[in-house]
Structure formats: structure tokens, C-alpha cells
Amino acid sequence: MSERNLEQLFIKRSQQKKKTSPLNYKERLFVLSDEKISYYDYDPEKGKKKSLKGSIELEKIKCVETVIPEDNSPPERLFPFQIIYDEGPLYVFSKSDDIRKLWIRKIRHVVRFNKDLMQKYHPRFWEDGVWRCCQQAVKQAMGCQVLETRNGGFANKSHRKSRKPLPPTPEEEKPSRPLPPQPPQPPPQQGPCPGSTVIAEYSYPPMAPQDLELRKDEEYTILEMSDANWWKARDKYGKEGYIPANYVTEATSGLEKFDWYCKNMNRSQAEHLMKTENKDGGFLVRDSSKAGKYTVSVFSKAGGETVGMCKHYNICTTSQGQFYLAQSHNFSSIPDLINYHQHNSAGLVSRLKHFVSNRVESAPSPFGLGYGVWEIDPTHLTFIKELGCGQFGVVKYGKWQGQHDVAIKMIKEGSMSEDDFIEEAKVMMKLRHQNLVQLYGVCTTQRPIYIVTEFLSNGCLLTYLRETLKGPTPIHLLEMCKDVTEGMAYLESQQFIHRDLAARNCLVAANGDIKVTDFGLSRYVLDDEYTSSAGTKFPVRWSPPEVLLYCKFSSKSDIWAYGVLMWEIYTLGKMPYERLNNSEIVDKVSTGLRLYRPQLANERVYSIMSTCWREKAEERPTFEELASNVQDLLYEMQ
Ligand code: ADP
Ligand code: MG
């Protein structure tokens, strides 16, 4: 966490100390310093802060959280958050979700050791003498919702909402006009709640008896969300059952049913996707970082170049509420606008020729193979091709029930202590995060036993770094690091130690996301060369001194390995300490040798990896802190 102050213009809501006093909203310059958050009157013309209007001492803060926006909130108030201190909540409205997230994270970090941190909060506003969430009429009433995280933690975001659009680079975006009255779009991270309407982005044929079939583009009502991954829902015929939460999206913008619309996709993901498709005129529409706005991203190989370029255009709106990309062509709806530009470039680098989408190709992996299933019937598996061979034997790509992609590890007899693993698999099934390879289930009624997991079509990260990635951008490399920190921060929060984190144990999804795999599996390996720190297969190059010397594994030894993994990413897959053999590494690393700064890593990046290699385990950061540092750096780079 950097020590510098943060400054930001926000809208602040008056605090309504008396029940009946009217609310007002004023723009204030907020400054976060080491001791307090102060807010000032601001002169937009001179760009200067004027008189101090108030301040909150950091040590009095009890909670910082988002707030669900007001019904019909205007576009400038779509991203509220609350700072709760001894005088109650202070409501602040951010221009974008990214800025809001940054502030929440920074404040949580500095208040994480405060005495009176709350465990419950009110997700909606206090207004006219009642809490809008629970209708309690006492301002001091205990919160009605348990905080997902406490003490400075950051929320494990739901799998669909992990990537928020980052602010676009201004030069490439057209100047935006004031927003017309538009249906407000709630910030994406709020997500649906019971009663919400969602749209199926993919069809889902039921896998287990309690499941409900999903038909692409149809609407469903959410009934219950007690399991984060399998929601109970009702279709339009009144049929009820469980659906995989990652197959639906909340109906907010009305664009969800169009294949060219990629909700929750950021600029660099869009570029990655379009470059991978490498088609002239490839395009997609994504949420702009400005609330309620959209951006058209287009890929062009104008002039027959082999390397194409990406352009990003804001969809602008006229004062009459019409949409346009090029001034003289206005449309009453975004689909009409897209339809027009599919036939006419009219000022764009290219006509919109082919939609590019990461969803049409294949449905995401549901979280398991049906609600509550973990023992898989091996006759439901079809083997398609061999993916590789690992410590436990052959890994194959296949289908479950003929349609769902899966990876199947066929455990060579004698390579694993199977009973212990099977016991542990029940725990591992419950680990769920968008940056962890999902364990779907096991086949244990025959030999060899199978471990069935999510399949990632771009394979192992190490091979991807060495062979596939050509001229990666600094943002792309850092985003890969970020994916790993988030998956690992989740494991850390579950007190689960990976023990073999390295690029070879990460996989790459079709859209470029990175997921960590094989967590905890090394405990079940029956092979002394692998399990003994003196063995030839032991991950010496990824191990800190305390593991090499005393076999002391912890989340902090995972942190060390993460630093080495980051180094692998920035060297595009070099072997760490390539000139040294294992016993030289043990000697030199325990006496202070560290990996050098890779050419692609700047000083900031190198300092992040270096913190992972601190001699004393307790001085290394946590994954949560790493995730926050990496996110900050990414934010600055956008
Ligand atoms: P083991 O854990 O037995 O050592 P690995 O995890 O190394 O086996 O798997 C061997 C190879 O199979 C990997 O290098 C990777 O290319 C491929 N592979 C493994 N799991 C998956 C998966 N879930 N999706 C896609 N490819 C995979
Ligand atoms: Mg492996």
C-alpha cells in the first residue's frame, strides 16, 4: 500500500441529522491523508480546493462499504459508498465503480486495525428516518447484512463481476456529451438479488434432477441465492429449480440478448479478444467506464497490414436521447446504431463486420455437474484427446454427458494416496473462485480413479508464456498476475495452502484469464523425488528458505512461490536460476541470493515481486495485499 494521499471529487450527501431536514448533494473534494478524510469546497474553474467543510478521523471509522443506489438515481449518483463512523454514515457518490473500489480498498486498508469495526451494515440508505433496507426506524439499529469481509479485507467478488471496466484513455475516446435522461444502470457489482430478473446468456440443459433448464436469451426470476453458485430460479412457465449462477446476467441494459454485447469486459480484455480473432472489422460493444454509457471496440487491419489495431468509440447521446458514433447518423436505439454501422463505416476505422464475443463459442463451466453432485458416473464421460502427462499420469480432454467440456486426470495406480485425496476432494469441491480451476467431481468406483475438473482451452500457463504470447503489453502481463493474486487471495482466505504454485500449475482460459490449479494436491503424491525437499522433482526453485531448510509450508511460502511465478510471467517462461542446480539454489537462496529484475518488469513490478522474497516469512505481504498492490498499479497504467 503506498503512503501517498488520495484526492478525488465526489458528490457528498448531506447527513440528514434531523429526520425531516431535506437532503442535498454537493460536489466536494475528498482528501485521504494518514490521519483523516477531509472534504473541501472546490472551485472547478480554478481547479483548486477552497474551504474545509468537514473531516472524519480514520480511527473513528467502523466500516466502509458500497450502498445500493437509490431508485431512479441520476447518472452521477450510481456508485455510492458509505463511510460509517461514530456519527453515522457519510454517503459519498463516485463517478465510476473503479474509483469507488479504489477508495474503499484504501480506506479499508488504513482502518483495518480500528477497534470498533462493524460486522453488519445496512446495504441501503438511511432516508427520511428509516433504513431503506430493513425499514428499521432507529439510526443506530444494527446492520441487517453481514459484511462479506471485515478488518480491511476485500470482498471475493462474484465470478461474473470480477473485471470492472477501467477508465478509458481519453484521447482515443470521443468527447462525451451530457447524458440524456436514461434508465439508470445499477453498478454491475451489485448483481441480482432474490426477485431480480435475469437473462440466460447460455442454454443450460439440466444436469441433476433439481436443476432448471435455461434457454438462451429467456428471462428468469431469481428466488433464492443461498448457494453463491447455484441459484434457485423460476422460468416464465412457473417451473422452478437450480441454475448455475454464471450462466445468467442481470437484465439491466436490455442489450444482454445481443451477441455483440460483452458486459463486464474491460478495454484490455476486448483488445485481447479482438487480436486473438484477428479479423478485420471484428467488433464488440462493452460497458464504458462512464456509468450508463457504452463503448464500441473495433479491430481493423486497414491497408492489409498483418498486425491490426484496436479503436474504441464511445456511443454518444444527443440531447434528444438519440445515439450516435458519427455525428450525422443518429439512432433511437443502440441495436439500430450497430445495425447501421454493420453496413456503413461512416467515420469508423472499419465497418462492423464480425461480432467478437467470448460467450457465443462456449458456455462457461458451471460450478460442478449439477446442484449437489460430486461422484461422477464414468459412463457419462467421453474421452476426446490427450492433453498431456503429469505427475499422476495422463490428463485428457473430454465431454461430460456429450456436451460439457471437462479435463480428466486419470490417476496412475500407485501415484497418489487415494483415500486421503478422496476425503479432501469433498473440501476442495467447495473451493470456488473464478481464478481457480474448478474441481467438478471424482470417479472413485473404479481404478484408475479420475479427477474431473474444468477444462481450459489455452492450456498450461508456462507453455502459453513460452510459445503463444507474442509481444504482450505491460497491462496484459500485469493482468495475468492479478488473476493469480485473486485466486490465491481466495485460497488464503480459506486457509488453504497451495504448496506448488508455479506457472506450470496455472492454466489459461479461452478469454485469456488465468486460473490456478492443482492446489494442495502435492500432499497426496506418492513419490519421494517430488515430496522430499532433496528430491529431484521438488519445486526447489519456487521454495523459500524455511521450506528448503525446515519444510515449513504456509501461505507465506505460497507468497514466495508467487513472486517466482510473477518472475516467470515477466521473463515469458524462463527457468528461475537457470544456471544453478538444486543444491546450489538451496545454498545461495538461504544466504540471500534473489532472482534478477526481468527486462519486461519495471521497478514497481520488480519491487512487488521482491517483497515476496523477504527472508522473514512474516514480513512478506499477504495475497490480499498483493492483489491490492497489483490492482493499484494496473489502475495507474490504464
Ligand atoms: P499433474 O497434475 O498430474 O502433474 P498436470 O496438471 O501437469 O498433471 O497436467 C498435464 C498437462 O495437461 C498440463 O500441462 C496441461 O497442459 C494439461 N492440463 C491439465 N489440466 C488441464 C485442464 N483443466 N484444462 C486444460 N489442460 C489441462
Ligand atoms: Mg500439475
Image (cartoon, rainbow, N blue to C red):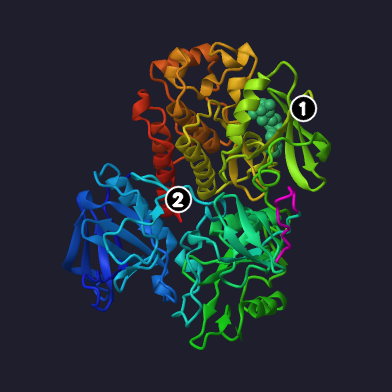
Tell me which image quadrant ligand 1 sits in: top right
Segment tinted magenta in the rendering = 206-217
**Disc 2, ligand 1: is the CB inside 8 Å?**
no
Spatial separation of the CA atoms under disc 2 and disc 1:
47 Å
Q: Which residue is mark 2?
A: 634
Please name the residue that numbered disc 1 is placed on.
445
Q: Is residue 97 left or right of residue 252?
A: left
In this view of the protein, can residue 382 be seen by the observer? no
Residue 130 position (above or below residue 603): below
Please say whether residue 207 is one of the residues in the magenta stretch: yes
Q: Position of residue 37 (x, y in %)?
A: 23, 57
Q: Residue at x 62, y 26 (%)?
A: 423
Residue 231 left/right relative to 143: right
Q: Position of residue 227 (x, y in %)?
A: 57, 49
Does residue 22 sit above or below 497 in this rendering? Answer: below
Picture coordinates of residue 562, whole percent (x, y): 49, 32
What secondary structure predominates along the stretch shown in magenta? loop
The front one of 572 and 289 is 289
Image check: 342 left or right of 127? right
Q: In the image, residue 337 lies at what x, y percent?
A: 64, 79
Tag 1: amino acid: Thr
Residue at 32%, 71% in the rendered image: 127
Q: Residue 198 or 527: which is nearer the viewer?
A: 198
Which amino acid type is marked by label 2? Leu
